Each structure stands twice: as C-alpha cells, then as structure tokens.
C-alpha cells in the first residue's frame, strides 16, 4: 500500500481540488484522510456519510481550584506562556494559551492545580462513494493541530485493510501540522501555481520533505495564468530532480464544481483531462495498480 | 493601531491585501508591516530590500552528565516527549521542546540548564521611506511557529501603526498573531471553501474579542452567501476585489496592484478608511 499526501506550502493552490479529483478517478481500493484539520474542506466535495464521531482531547490543561488557591501567584510567575491570568480577582488558566506543560501544577505549594483533559475538536470517520474518509474538526483557537492530524492518520490506517492507497489532503505551511502529515508517508504531491510566492513556498516545502526522505512530485495548477513563471517552476524542479507529474490549466469548471459540491472530474473539461493524465503518471511512478 | 489580516483558508489573498494596504498607507504615514506567516512568509517578495537578520532562539535543555544520576524525573515530567532517559544517558529531542522550563525545575540533581537553540530569524528592512517590513521566518524542519511570530511582533511593538499578516488556519500561530490586535480583516473568496473557512476565522476573532470585517477577493459576482453570512454576524464588507487576469498577473509576479494598476491606490485607502479608528 502507498501513502500519498497532497501538500503545497502556500495555501489556496488547489490541494483539496486535486485530492478530490484523484480520489474520484483513482479506481483502486483506497482510504482518504483530510489532514488539513484547521480548515477541513475535502468533505464539501465528497458528500461523506458519517460512521463515527469521537471527541478529540489534546494535551491536558491546568485547572486551579479556587477553594484551595491562596493567591500566592507562584504559578503565574513560572508559566512561560502567559496562560495564568487574573480574572475577577482570582488566578485562572486561560486555555487558549495553556500549552499543557504541567509546570503550574508542579510549582503550586498548595496543590491547588491539577491537569485536566481538554476537548479541542472532533474526529470523524465516514463513508464516501470513493472509499472511507477519516477527517476532523479542530475548534477555532485550539492548539494541538499536529496531534489531531496524527489521530486522523491513525483512523485512516485502521480503515485501510485491503486498500492500495491512503490519500491524504494536507495542510498549508511547513510547520507542525505539515510535518505531522508527511511523517510516515511514502510520497508527497506538491500542488503549486505560477507565482513568485508559490515558488518560494515550494522551495521551503521541498527542503522540509527532503529531510523526511519522501518521494516528491509536483503538479502545477493554473499553469497557463503566467507561463513565464511556470517555466521557472519547471526549471527549478528539473534542477532538483523532481518530476512534474502534471500541469492543470485555468478552467472555470473548477470553481463551478466546488460550488456544485463535487470533484471537477465529474465534468467534461480541460481540467479533468489534465487530472486524468496526472493520475496515470503518478500511479505508474508509484506502482499503484 | 494594530490591524491583523487573517483567513481560515490559505491563498485567499491575505498577503495581497496586507502588501497593498501597507503600500497605500505608507504614502502618507509611517507603517510597520509584520509578516507573521512564518512558515511561508511572502511579503518580502512584494517589497525587495536589503534586510538585517536577528536570530530567534528558544531555550532547550542541556544535561550535565557529570551531575545526572539517570533518575528519570525529567523524562517523566516532559509532556512533549522532548526528553527520554535510556540505559546510560538522557536523550533530548530539542525540536519537540516547548521551552516550558519544567525539566530544570524537576531535576533533583540540578543537572539541567537551558541553552538557546536557533529556530528561526526575524528579518528587518525599510523598502520604502515610510514602510518598515519585519518578517518572521521559521527554519525549515522546525515545528513551533509561535515563538518566531512573537519575536517578530515584539520587534514592531511600540510603533503607532502596525499591520500583521497572519498564516492560514485557526490554531496557535493565528492566535499568536491576532493577540493584541485592535481590528481583524478577514480575507475570503466567494466559494463554499472560502465561506466554510471564513466562518472558522470569524470564530477565532470572536473568541479573542477582536472586531472584524471582510474583504471578498477574486469575486466573480456570486457573493450572496458570503454577504449574507457577514450581515448575520455583523461583519461589514470592507472591500470586494473582482477576479481578473490582470490582477492575477500583477500579483503572481510580486507586483502591487495599488501601485501598478490605476485606481487601486484609492481603493486601498478606502479600505483603510472603512476600519474604525483609522484616519488615512
């Protein structure tokens, strides 16, 4: 089984559109995972039917028992995250800033602080017409997005008996959620677009992916919007020894399909043709039947 | 005045709005623009200039093996998995360390001290006479963006007019960026993805108690649902930028539509005026 993550560095280049399209036309037993837990959009295109919902508990957070607290303020002076704050003349833990380190619990001379579970999202498994989907919802303002990604991946693996492919829709960026997404994958498909920002971000992304020993493929979305910069991306990839596995033209069918809530590959369009060619190249390279 | 530019969804045009707003305002006042998208900072591409770098470090544990008796307290305490006590030594995984300082507190032997470790840098430049650009840059392979964002914001602190360009998403880096802002511009696009993620980003601003307004980017005129959502949540529509190949061509090459296309400087000044408390 191959594990492939669709990522991009820069946001909004078309990761979810490409993931949904590959899922739609893959034609192999597969499990899908939406690892962009902060802005999970894959389900908007795949019409999932929910199988299970679980609470997601991130790291524990501190809680101060005000009946025991003597107001000494030692916890506040040791917290490096500014998470112990004054509210109505009491010290309380601001869960938005609490990183769950446990230092407040350790330093409190009264034993007034304990670390308690903190629900900061939900984990789902669903069924779609194209296989199981593991996905999640992080509550706005919560930390722990990397941990939630790890949980989503675990659910996908648990559902993958008999599958040839786990296909993950990744988050933008190169930090914690991205690294949580790509670790343990076999290959990544980086979706980029012809712009100086996207190219700059692709270069940083490739540097990170190299450290994880991942096979890297690139697809250039909306390649015809700036053909000169597209050529720069292609020469960068050539110099880096990265296969450009596809080029997708700017096509109004893409936005129309998002509005219709379906993968663009359900339409007869130039984008669909390009995505089919991408699928064939990618699957051949990765040895997916 | 501190204004944050955010969006749940990536690629909606945060940096485009931030760069053009900063450029238009810097024609007549001093502005500091802070790139808080430290994983993928891009504003310097719009404002090329020579920059001075300041390293960003985070304190991480260093074990003095002559004092350590392998009791294991540090490894038991660390909730981030940054320390592990094995047969004959303590292994440290500094990239997992959140710099809470807990291990130094719990070590009964006083065998742990904290040493600075470079996780990124802040680059400072003055691309225009009245514009200072401060860019937070997370080193490739590092996990923790918030300390780099904090360092970039700290460098700007005290300036009367600051713009923060946030990363996409709704988790810790965005919280770190929005914290302390007087106003938040939420940039969206009129697709179901844009609306879904606008809802989340508006939730973050609301959680932090920061008043917000909406900029609709790449509009193809089908904005009814976004407008209805904004009205329902008392979010004024501050500006609508249509989809056009001309705008895309300028932006994709690192150009500024406020400078390079007629009429847009005024429109970005109108955006500034639409923000409560800004007198352009």
Image (tube, rainbow, N blue to C red):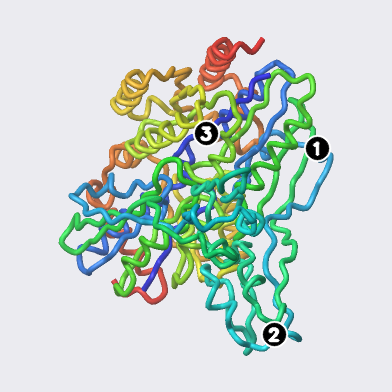
Q: Which mark is residue A49?
A: 1
| Same chain check for tags 3 and 1 | yes
Q: Quadrant of residue A226?
A: top left
Q: Helix, strand, or loop for circle 1?
A: strand
> What residue is shown with label 2?
A69
In the depicted view, which residue is nearer to us: A245 or B115? B115
Which of discs 1 and 2 lies nearer the camera? The answer is 2
Image height check: is B27 above or below A286? below
On the image, the x and y values in percent for residue A253 come to 54, 28
Q: Are marks 2 and 3 in contact (CB under 8 Å)?
A: no
Q: Are marks 1 and 2 in contact (CB under 8 Å)?
A: no
Q: Helix, strand, or loop for circle 3?
A: strand
Q: Is any atom of residue B25 visible in this view? A: yes
Q: Residue at x 66, y 52 (%)?
A: A138
Q: Which mark is residue B137?
A: none
| Lower position in the chain sequence, tag 2 or tag 3 | 3
């Amino acid at each position: 089984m191959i594990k492939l993550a669709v990522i991009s560095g820069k946001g909004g280049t078309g990761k979810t559109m490409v993931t949904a399209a590959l899922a739609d036309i893959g034609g192999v037993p597969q499990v899908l995972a939406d690892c962009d837990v902060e802005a999970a959009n894959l389900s908007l295109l795949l019409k999932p039917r929910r199988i299970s919902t679980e609470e997601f508990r991130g790291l524990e957070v501190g809680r101060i028992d005000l009946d025991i607290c003597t107001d000494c303020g030692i916890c506040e002076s040791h917290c490096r995250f500014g998470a112990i704050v004054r509210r109505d003349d009491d010290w309380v833990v601001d869960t938005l800033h609490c990183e769950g380190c446990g230092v407040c619990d350790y330093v409190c001379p009264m034993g007034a602080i304990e670390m308690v579970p903190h629900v900061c999202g939900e984990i789902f498994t669903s069924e779609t017409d194209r296989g199981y989907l593991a996905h999640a919802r992080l509550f706005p303002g919560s930390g722990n997005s990397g941990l939630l990604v790890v949980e989503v991946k675990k659910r996908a693996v648990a559902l993958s008996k008999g599958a040839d492919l786990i296909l993950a829709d990744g988050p933008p960026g190169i930090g914690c959620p991205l690294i949580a997404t790509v670790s343990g994958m076999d290959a990544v498909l980086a979706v980029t677009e012809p712009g100086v920002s996207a190219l700059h971000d692709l270069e940083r992304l490739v540097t990170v992916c190299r450290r994880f020993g991942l096979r890297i493929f690139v697809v250039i979305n909306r390649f015809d919007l700036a053909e000169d910069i597209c050529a720069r991306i292609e020469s960068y990839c050539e110099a880096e020894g990265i296969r450009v596995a596809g080029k997708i033209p700017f096509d109004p069918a893409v936005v129309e399909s998002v509005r219709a809530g379906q993968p663009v590959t359900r339409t007869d369009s130039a984008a669909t043709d390009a995505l089919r060619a991408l699928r064939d190249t990618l699957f051949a390279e990765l040895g997916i039947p | 005045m501190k204004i944050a530019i955010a969006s749940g969804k990536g690629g909606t045009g945060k940096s485009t709005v931030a760069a053009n707003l900063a450029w238009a305002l810097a024609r007549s006042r001093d502005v500091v623009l802070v790139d808080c998208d430290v994983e993928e900072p891009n504003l310097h591409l719009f404002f090329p200039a020579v920059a001075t770098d300041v390293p960003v470090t985070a304190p991480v544990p260093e074990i003095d093996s002559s004092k350590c008796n392998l009791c294991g307290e540090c490894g038991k305490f660390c909730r981030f998995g940054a320390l592990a006590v094995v047969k004959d030594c303590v292994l440290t995984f500094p990239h997992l360390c959140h710099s809470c300082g807990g291990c130094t507190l719990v070590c009964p032997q006083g065998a742990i001290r904290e040493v600075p470790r470079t996780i990124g840098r802040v680059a400072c430049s003055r691309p225009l006479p009245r514009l200072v650009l401060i860019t937070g840059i997370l080193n490739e392979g590092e996990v923790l963006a918030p300390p780099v964002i904090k360092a970039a914001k700290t460098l700007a602190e005290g300036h009367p007019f600051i713009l923060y360009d946030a990363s996409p998403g709704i988790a810790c880096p965005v919280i770190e960026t929005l914290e302390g802002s007087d106003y938040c511009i939420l940039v969206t696009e009129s697709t179901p993805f844009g609306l879904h993620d606008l809802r989340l980003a508006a939730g973050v601003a609301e959680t932090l108690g920061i008043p917000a307004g909406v900029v609709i980017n790449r509009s193809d005129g089908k904005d009814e649902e976004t407008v209805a959502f904004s009205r329902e949540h008392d979010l004024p529509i501050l500006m609508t930028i249509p989809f056009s190949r001309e705008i895309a061509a300028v932006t994709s090459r690192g150009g500024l539509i406020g400078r390079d296309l007629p009429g847009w400087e005024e429109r970005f000044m109108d955006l500034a005026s639409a923000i409560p408390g800004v007198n352009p």
